[in-house]
Image: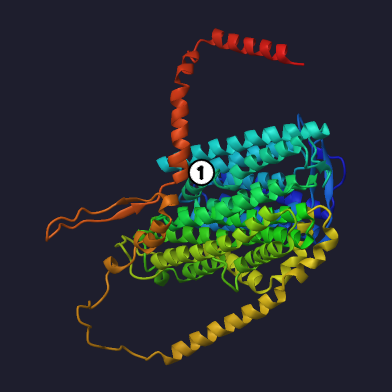
Amino acid sequence: MIFLRESLSPAALLVVVGMLLSTCSGFPALLYPRRDGRGQKVATLFMIVGSVAGCAGALMILLAGSSQRYVIDGGFFLGGSEWGVDPLSAFFLIPLFLMAGCCSLYAVGYFPQAKHPSSAPRLTFFLGLLVASVALVFTARDGILFLVAWEIMALASFFAMTTEDQKKEVQEAGLLFLVAAHMGTLFLFAHFSLLKGEGATFAFPGPATLDAGTLSATALFLTALAGFSFKAGIMPLHIWLPSAHAAAPSHVSALMSGVIIKTGIYGMVRVTTFFYHLPNWWGMMLLTLGIVSAVVGVLFALGQHDLKRLLAYHSIENIGIIVMGVGLALLGRSSGNIPLQLLGMGGALLHLLNHAIFKGLLFLGAGSVIHAAGSREIDLMGGLAKRLPFTATFFLVGAAAICGLPPLNGFVSEYLIYMGLFRGVIEVGGGATAAVSLMASAVPALALVGALALACFVKAYGIVFLGLPRRESVTQPHEAGLVMLLPMGLLALLCILLGLFPQGVVRLLGPAVAGGLPGSSQAVAELTLLAPLGWITVMGLVLLLLVAFISIFSLRRRPGGVVTAVTWDCGYLHSTPRMQYTASSFAALLVDLFGGILRPRRHGPKVTGPFPAPSSYSSHVPEAVLELIYLPILKWGNELLMPLRKLQHGRIPLYILYIFVTVIVLLALAP
């Protein structure tokens, strides 16, 4: 039996209740008859109650600014492990439980058990297990417990995303995810083994207790960076993310993009808190990786025709923005610049929360669109705003937020990172000229990302929701039900509130920033002084009033009734779907401009003669890193190692001999 040596505080108890209810939420769906929807509804109730309890406990810890740590007794191998909650992990728990409740409610309408009797119970079970395992990742305080939770999270993610495993693309995406997840886990095994060598125990070291200037510290940082980058989807280790997000059910995609990939960010931030005297190159490496992920991620999003793959690449882009903020904070730590630390880490953590909200909203909106249109292909949609007015409105809010447009929440967090970059260029000097140059380069890179994201979502929203339908549908698309609209409405409301009143979240952000920056607790109060968040509220309200005034003025000047006019020369009486932009044509100029990175593939018509036959044009942007780098290397390695397959002959006595010889060699080499 597993129990804690000390009694839990009320806040920690609420977090544990949230974890336990999430774990148990999947069982009612398994126990009720398969075609009985009551099991899924009971599971949803469990998840919502658990989410409320978990959020309440996390908020209590953030408001109190306290850290609590407990030792686990009993169990086969978890005895002596440590578990705890501090402001940093509490901040990560908030988007987890928020998205868990929203996705669970959304699933009742999107993936009802009555229509999916064989797969919905399994999905409900693994979704609950996934939420609980992620919460355990955020609250584990030693390497063994962390790796156990990490592996459960990987397996639960795999089974949740491969729910529709009868499809070949889902099978391939699941296999790629599993390979990438375990590659990252191998690096984490190495990391925690090295960490045990530093402290003779698997327990996490205290804040700023390890010297970052040693060779072992470099190994610890690099193994952690590699292991957590696989999960976070940082380029070039992002190869699993586009296919996994596209293949998973939409509410699972929302949870994976909004929360699961953030476990990699949590791991990076947590590991850096162990060290003091950070070298400059740590922050510079993260800042460089962030710039590359943000710019290249949004470029690949521009060339996508699949709505969910487009959103997946924007996850890579936003992870890049978050990593830029973390890198900026580490540069602040290495130079002793407190404002740089606060703006970098504050912007990163706030963007992490904001991204969970608006990306969750966009994936749920995409699920509603797919539910109505029966396809993920953008070029097969069009005119859906008339049929899906609420979904179109909510998706528009999420699209504006992810582009960093005021007065929505995406603008606020990017604004903090901008302020940090400008401040770093001005204040960091001395021998850090390379760091200053990199921060100066990050400013136009972040601006480019915002512009390209805006172009991408103009394409996505315009082609999906505006214009005329591009194909005749057997059934008319219809708006989603209330249980699907409620989570989207809540997330859209949060996008607006956090954008208009960002100072309200600073009180929660401050303790979390202090948790990610050892020794900065006295300076957290300066965060509101460094960025005038009050002016964001004033400007946001003025902008909303201006938009409302222009809208009312335009409507009043619009003539009533039907206006008739002579058709202009060479014109058409009415438009047709063939006259509208496609995803390829809209993004063609930008895709061609960055063709050296995107490597687009075109299938154009062969026009011959004065009266050519009907023809078509299509384009495709491949996953260049996977298809042009990783797969050729793997193919070459497979051919190189082909002779070694002769050792795999199926004779068990010889396999035993191999093991015996290996043990003898290891014993001989042991000191």
Horizontal placement of 485 versus 581: left or right? right
Q: Dot 1 surroundings within 10 Å: few (below 14), some, or many (20 or more)?
A: many
Q: Position of residue 169 (x, y in %)?
A: 42, 42
- The answer to which quarter of the image holds residue 498 is bottom right
Q: Secondary structure at mark 1?
A: loop
Residue 177 against residue 421 in the figure, above or below: above
Query: Which residue is depicted at the point 58% across and 48% down?
Result: 234
Closer-to-camera residue (441/76): 441
Horizontal placement of 359 versus 221: left or right? left
Query: What colouring method underlies this structural image?
Result: rainbow
Q: Which amino acid lies under the numbered mark 1 shown in the image of this protein?
A: Ile
Which residue in the rendered view is the most extreme toward the right? Answer: 6
Closer-to-camera residue (663/226): 226
Give the residue at mark 1.
239
Q: Quadrant of the C terminus?
A: top right
Query: Which residue is depicted at the point 53% across and 63% down?
Result: 448
Closer-to-camera residue (481/303): 303
> Quick check: can you spot residue 642?
yes
Q: Position of residue 143 (x, y in %)?
A: 74, 37
Query: Which residue is depicted at the point 35% across and 59% down?
Result: 584
Q: Quadrant of the N terminus?
A: top right
Q: Position of residue 5 (x, y in %)?
A: 87, 40
Q: Position of residue 283 (x, y in %)?
A: 69, 50
